[in-house]
Amino acid sequence: MAKTRRTTTRRPAASAQAPLEFNPDYTDVKRDLKRIGILASSFIVLLVVLSFFLR
């Protein structure tokens, strides 16, 4: 059996890399959630009003 020589790859130091900044933009998500909230509350109000007429 022949001995194999292991080669190790060297990684650069963590301080050498610039830190990545994660700054997502949630304006579309906020607008969609606001629209969903308005629609849900209007449907609930509509159901309450219809329940008075259907009794």
Image (spheres, rainbow, N blue to C red):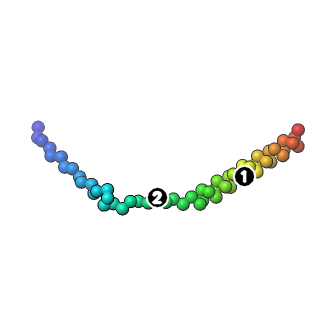
Q: Is residue 6 left or right of residue 30?
A: left
Decide if residue 4 is on the left or right side of residue 31: left
| Residue at 15%, 46% in the rendered image | 5
Q: Which residue is mark 2?
A: 22
Quadrant in the picture for the C terminus: top right
Kindly report the distance in space between the C-alpha atoms of the residues bearing marks 1 and 2. Answer: 32 Å
Is residue 20 or residue 42 the one in the foreground? 20
Q: Judging from the image, what secondary structure is the residue with disc 2 in?
A: loop
**Kind of element beneath mark 1:** helix
Q: Marks 1 and 2: CB-CB under 8 Å?
A: no
Locate residue 26, reporting x and y percent. Answer: 57, 58
Residue 39's label in the rendered image is: 1
Q: Residue at x 24, y 54 (%)?
A: 10
Question: Local crowd at mark 1 within 10 Å, few (<14), some, or many (≥20)?
Answer: few
Q: Position of residue 9 (x, y in %)?
A: 23, 52
Q: Is residue 48 left or right of residue 19?
A: right
Q: Which mark is residue 15?
A: none
Amino acid type at circle 2 is Phe
Which mark lies nearer to you, 1 or 2?
Answer: 2
**Residue 39: % across, % down:** 72, 52
Q: Most extreme residue toward the front, as rendered?
A: 15
Point out residue 21 in the picture as x, y percentages from the top left corner. 44, 60
Q: Residues within 10 Å of mark 2 (few under 14, many from 20)?
A: few
Q: Compare marks 1 and 2 and give the one earlier in the sequence.
A: 2
Amino acid type assigned to the residue bearing label 1 in the image: Leu
For residue 39, above or below residue 1: below
